[in-house]
Image (cartoon, grey):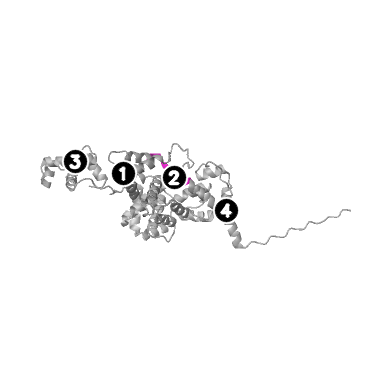
Amino acid sequence: MQTTVAKPKPKPKPAAAKGDASEAKARSSAPAKAAAPAEAQRRAAGVAAPSGERHQNEGHGRRLTMAFEALEAFPALAESRDRLLTVISKDHVATADVVSAVESDVALIITVLRMANQAQAGRGRIDTVVAAVDLLKPQTVQALATRVRTFDFFERSSVWEAAPERFRLHALATQHAADRVAGEVGYEHRDRLTVTALLHDVGKLVLMYAYPGYPAQVHRGARTPEDRVHRERRELGVDHALVGGVLIRRWGLPAAIATTIERHHNPEVEGEAAFIRLGDMLAHYEQGAAVSPSELLQTARTVGLGPSELRQVMYELPTGPSQRRRHVDPCPLSGRELGVLQRLAEGKVYKQIAHELTLSTSTVRTHLHNIYGKLGAVDRAQAVLIATERGWL
């Protein structure tokens, strides 16, 4: 007769405390996202797999470090780079034109600002493109531009695929909106605000590289910018604003820019970060995305913009931003030459100009000849146009 020995029953595991269960769920959420099929992840995130396999079990720190390193080669729009090189190749290089060309692209801004801050070597941080171009001079900017990687809408061969296009468009929309608000309330640090606005979402590029399910899976169901930040913190343990600030510091850019980027989604935000937060919400509004009316109005009041002024800004934004005139080039004309050119711009003839300035007609002609040479103009119309564009008239 066989004797059956009963197997001992396994001891029940002790029930986890409620807090422990929540913590375990939070820890497991991000890896669960990364465990989805790789190709589906890449399609959702809009990026291609980089060379070399990413290990799914690596920690958050390693993932972010790899992403920071990848951002070292973030590409510029080919058209932006080409326009910058065209501006610098002219016989008479205008600093304002170089600044505008650099500010048209996030990668160009990053490249120029990093080089300028390295050149400063502890003598104070450079926080505007105007100061960076003035320090480096056009020749150095030209050399940097020739080495920068580029992307093109019709030739998507980089690791980032469509990400640079989406990022650049939203960055420019935010910058235009923030600058429009800054002009409305008389904010004086608009050149620095331009840099911060264009870089405000750089942390999204880090998360996009580090987590293949970002942003599609992480933001699923979120409507407003605040909702998306909340889901990032819940799913990944960090948000793009915080990561962006870390990256800015890693690049050696001013701490003031990093702090503003870190705080631009904070509901209690003040100062320059409030301009960025408002610009970001207005950019989403302009593009037809959902924003919170109460958050929008609250942030507008923080920067000194009332409901009626905010309505006016919201009405005018879709018509396109006006290019702010930059007064960064010293005028090469003497006071007398400027007076002659001003009257020429008003449509006055040589005799009228000579009479008003108590000069002879031949002296007026001599002044005009000198003006053409200094401005690189071939006629009076071009001279007036150049002087107007550079803010001298």
Q: Which residues are magenta?
A: 70-79
Q: Identify the mark at residue 166; answer none if there is no mark.
A: 2
Where residue 78 sits in the image (x, y, percent)? Answer: 40, 39
Assign a secondary structure to mark 1: helix
The crowding category of the residue bearing disc 4, from other C-alpha atoms within 10 Å (few below 14, some 14 to 19, many at least 20), is: some
The earlier-in-sequence mark between 2 and 1 is 1
The crowding category of the residue bearing disc 2, from other C-alpha atoms within 10 Å (few below 14, some 14 to 19, many at least 20), is: few
Q: Identify the mark at residue 370; answer none if there is no mark.
A: 3
Are the two marked residues, 4 and 3, in contact with CB atoms closer than 8 angstroms? Answer: no
Residue 77 belongs to the span the image colors magenta: yes
Residue 364 belongs to the span the image colors magenta: no
Where residue 392 sits in the image (x, y, percent)? Answer: 23, 47
Q: Identify the mark at residue 97; answer none if there is no mark.
A: 1
Question: How far, Cα to Cα, is label 2 from label 1?
Answer: 25 Å
Assign a secondary structure to mark 4: helix
User: Of 392 and 174, which appears nearest the observer?
Assistant: 392
Q: Which residue type does callout 3 highlight?
A: Asn
Question: How far, Cα to Cα, is label 3 from label 1?
Answer: 22 Å
| Main SS category, magenta section | helix
